[in-house]
Image: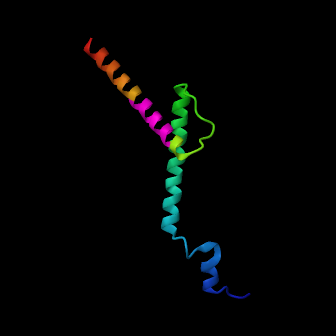
Amino acid sequence: MEKIPEHRKNAFKAKSIFKLDEVRRRREEQQVEIRRKNREESLAKRRNLNIPASLDSDDETADWDVQVRVITTVSAIIVIACVAHVVNQ
């Protein structure tokens, strides 16, 4: 059985191009983004918001993200106000 030359091993699946740390970091970032998106979708479903089936541009994605954050912030403020009102009574 022949030994495989080192340059062939490094060229396989472009191991020399992609560094392990960089690939791991990118994969972890993508996993975080997927979890964040799923969490926002589940929160929107609980609040009975309509989730667009597909977004055509990044602008719409950014607008959607802002809307979700604003709704989340407003909901948190309402909860805090209700708790403060109950405590003060």
Q: Quadrant of the N terminus?
A: bottom right
Residue 81 as seen in the image, left or right of residue 22: left
At 48% from the left and 42% from the top, the residue drawn is 62
Residue 59 appears at what percent x and percent y?
51, 44
At 63% from the left and 80% from the top, the residue drawn is 9
Between residue 21 and residue 51, name the one nearer to us.
Answer: 51
Residue 54 appears at what percent x and percent y?
62, 40
Please tell me whether residue 24 is drawn above or below residue 49 in the rendered image: below
In the image, farthest residue toward the top = 89
In the image, farthest residue toward the left = 88
Q: Quadrant of the C terminus?
A: top left
Residue 27 appears at what percent x and percent y?
53, 58
At 31% from the left and 15% from the top, the residue drawn is 86
Q: Which residues are magenta?
A: 62-73
Please tell me whether residue 83 is drawn above or below residue 16 in the rendered image: above
Q: Is residue 23 magenta?
A: no
Dominant SS of magenta comes to helix
